[in-house]
């Protein structure tokens, strides 16, 4: 069994120093790794990133993160990434990383992702340059996620997790206004997950959404935005041996409790 | 009727709404401006919901700190001066979970 802790949208600033630390200190007792699903800061400044870095530094479990749109607000995502990496956080954007959990290889592929909307109700690569670039950017993010998941498969990971900030499915947006769904996620992310296969997809971004969802290929999706889970993090128990590389064809999935 | 997009002709004309008479007709635009300010000013808040309800405005959502909540309430009062603002803003909970979810 693999114990995955996850939270997104912690939006740390100067006034949140130490807020999460007491809960994070309990991680070794309940989780094997911690996933951070983006929007770690409020305005994406290196100063805020340092608050996050201090909060995460020296934890007894590996910490793996993607950035969110807030972490881009100050136009310095590279600096934010560097600050977090200096603190030992593995920041992913189109790549993947492997964690060894008692001899079991657990892979995480990640991208911030972007918007565009969901199948049948989405933007397309047509018209103005900015519109085409909008959709192409999401496509590049999705391609990076798919490549990362495929790499993990080649590396023989017993469990693979897709980590994004934007949502791959509309299910976990329930509660948000329908009109803003295209700004909250894209089906291209779900298509990448279903094409490459994964055991779990974790995202944030939709504060008013709901926790549980599923891709059309049967991969469980969890919205771990802190306002949704109402905790410092949630923990998911994955049973990797039962779920080896769940492909899109394996649509049968037992109902979650 | 629709040439003034913000002009909400409230159906309950009998309501005590002392604010209704004082409310300017462009409340939709004022809400849009407030949301823009919340996103771009110090708090960087995109997840706050601001909705007109009758003659008043409800501001709701979850924020990371008490300071953020106070700032949002201050900016909302400032931007919607003359309109009754009802705030229902929750500070995010930072406790560790008490149980996992089994994904069997």
Image: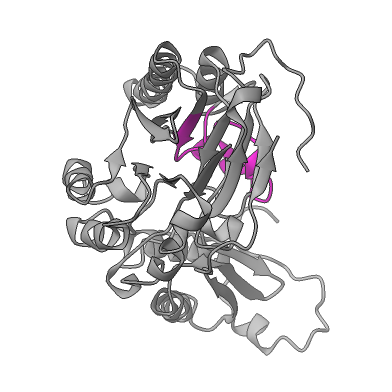
Would residue A205 appear left or right of A70 to someone viewing this image? right
Would residue A80 appear left or right of B37 to someone viewing this image? left
Residue at the image position 81 percent from the left and 70 percent from the top: B11
Of A12 and A62, nearer the camera is A62
Q: How is the image coloured?
A: one colour
Q: Is residue A237 magenta?
A: no
Numbered marks: total: 0
Residue A122 visible in the shown view: yes
Asked where in the image residue A52 lies, by quadrant, the reply is: bottom left
Residue at the image position 56 percent from the left and 73 percent from the top: B90
Would residue A83 appear left or right of B57 to someone viewing this image? left
Residue B33 visible in the shown view: no
| Above-or-below relation of A65 to A96 | below
Where's the N terminus of chain A, which quadrant?
top right
Q: Residue furthest front?
A: A102
Asked where in the image residue B28 lies, by quadrant, the reply is: bottom right
Would residue B60 appear left or right of A69 to someone viewing this image? right
Of A222 and A199, nearer the camera is A199
Q: In the image, which residues are magenta?
A: A161-186
Percent across and percent down for residue A92 are 32, 34
| Above-or-below relation of B45 to A15 | above
Percent across and percent down for residue A137 are 36, 24
| Above-or-below relation of A46 to B96 | above
């Amino acid at each position: 069994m693999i114990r995955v802790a996850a939270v997104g949208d912690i939006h740390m600033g100067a006034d949140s120093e130490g807020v999460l630390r007491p809960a994070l200190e309990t991680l070794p007792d309940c989780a094997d790794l911690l996933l951070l699903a983006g929007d770690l800061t409020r305005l994406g400044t290196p100063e805020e990133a340092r608050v996050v870095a201090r909060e995460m530094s020296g934890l007894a479990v590996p910490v793996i993160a993607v950035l969110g749109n807030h972490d881009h607000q100050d136009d310095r995502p590279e600096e934010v990434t560097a600050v977090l990496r200096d603190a030992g956080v593995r920041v992913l954007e189109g790549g993947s990383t492997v964690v060894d959990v008692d001899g079991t290889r657990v892979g995480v592929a990640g991208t911030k992702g972007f918007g565009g909307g969901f199948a049948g109700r989405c933007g397309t690569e047509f018209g103005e340059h900015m519109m085409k670039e909008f959709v192409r950017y999401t496509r590049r993010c999705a391609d990076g996620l798919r490549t990362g998941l495929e790499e993990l498969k080649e590396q023989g990971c017993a469990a693979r997790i897709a980590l994004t900030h934007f949502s791959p499915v509309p299910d976990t947006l329930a509660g948000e206004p329908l009109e803003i769904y295209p700004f909250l996620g894209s089906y291209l992310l779900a298509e990448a997950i279903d094409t490459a296969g994964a055991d779990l997809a974790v995202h944030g971004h939709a504060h008013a959404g709901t926790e549980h969802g599923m891709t059309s290929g049967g991969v469980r999706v969890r919205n771990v935005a802190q306002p949704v889970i109402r905790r410092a993090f949630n923990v998911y128990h994955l049973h990797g041996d039962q779920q080896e590389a769940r492909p899109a064809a394996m649509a049968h999935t037992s109902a979650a409790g | 009727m629709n040439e003034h997009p913000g002009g909400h002709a409230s159906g309950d004309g009998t309501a005590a709404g002392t604010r209704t008479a004082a409310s300017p007709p462009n409340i939709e635009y004022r809400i849009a401006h407030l949301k823009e300010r919340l996103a771009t000013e110090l708090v960087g808040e995109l997840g706050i919901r601001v909705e007109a309800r009758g003659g008043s405005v409800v501001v709701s959502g979850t924020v990371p700190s008490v300071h953020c909540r106070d700032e949002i309430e201050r900016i909302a009062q400032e931007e919607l001066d003359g309109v009754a603002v009802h705030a229902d803003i929750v500070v995010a909970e930072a406790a560790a979970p008490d149980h996992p979810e089994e994904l069997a």
